[in-house]
Amino acid sequence: MDINAQTQFCGVIGNPVEHSLSPAIHNAAFQKLGLNFVYLAFRVEAIGDAIRGLRALGNFRGASVTIPHKVAAVPFLDAVEPTARHIGAINTIVAEGGTLTGYNTDATGALRALREGGVALKGRQVVMLGSGGAARAIAFALGTEAGIDRLSLLGIDERERTVLAGDLQSKTGMTVQALPLDEGTLRELLPGTHVLIHCTPMGMSPNVQGTAVPATLLHAGLTVMDIVYNPRDTQLLKDAKAIGCRTIPGLEMFLHQAAAQFELWTNHTAPTDVMRAVLESRFS
């Protein structure tokens, strides 16, 4: 596809962005569908100035918003869809007729990864490890879109997990149990748990030996999802596979959050096979 005056552009806004895989997967997807789009990486410090600048450019179609701007970008938008508003953070901007709307496809991406992995959520005992931004997004999606009615939330930061539990209960009606993330709590909860979702950075490259869950506490009736995608097989997922758990790697959530962004910008079904192949080539 030739780049010309009609080319619409999207990009990732963050700091740093040099190692982002988003340009590779989105440009491959645009090319596959023959769309006159291009995706760039923008290292941005002053988020308000950046969004005002993008508004002034007629061919701007949307952006991925990453660390550290997911919360800071919100006041500069015209609208924020309800799930993202509840979460208090966005990871996607869509420009439509001069209006900028914020979305959070981290939430959508996690649910798609779980559904495509064949995981039943309703009526199941779900335990989430972590209480930061990604945990917020996924927990709200579980309460608003997946319709689960109870969640056990384990976090190291007492204030953060308590605030998140309160927000979830008041905004989704879910019953949320907020507990410390330690071996004693895990030992008590995991035998009756069906789905375990890991949302902390533990096990992320370069600290690949780290895991939040001792292998001896896992059991074969558990589905384990880890949102860390580098390495592809974290220590937690290796331990879970060894004991016979169903596992969902973080690469799936990353892929599906990107596919949801692609669909918001283009109104076309994302070619997830192409996007997956590009991602996998980076981790092979």
Image: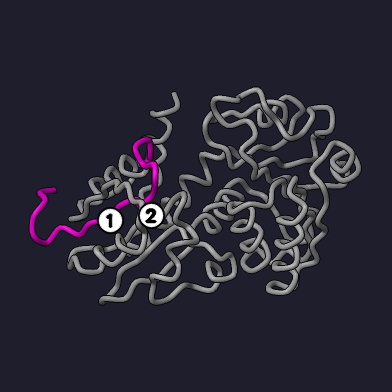
Q: Which amino acid does label 1 sit on?
A: Cys
- From this view, report whether residue 182 is shown above or below residue 87: above
Looking at the image, residue 138 sits to the left or right of residue 29; the answer is: right
Q: What stretch is highlighted in magenta?
A: 1-21
* Quadrant in which residue 262 is drawn: bottom left
Label 2 and label 1: CA atoms lie apart by: 8 Å
Q: Which amino acid does label 2 sit on?
A: Ser
Q: Which mark is drawn over residue 101?
A: none
Looking at the image, residue 258 sits to the left or right of residue 149; the answer is: left
Look at the image and say whether residue 208 sits in the magenta stretch. Answer: no
Q: Across the whole image, how many numbered discs are drawn on residues?
A: 2
Mark 1 or mark 2, which is nearer the start of the sequence? 1
Nearer to us in this view, 19 or 249: 19
Residue at position x 72%, y 42% in the image: 223
Q: Residues within 10 Å of mark 1 (few under 14, many from 20)?
A: many
Residue at position x 41%, y 52% in the image: 259
Task: Check disc 1 and report the residue beneath it.
Answer: 10
Task: Check disc 2 and report the residue beneath it.
Answer: 64
**x, y percent for residue 151:** 77, 58
Residue 19 visible in the shown view:
yes
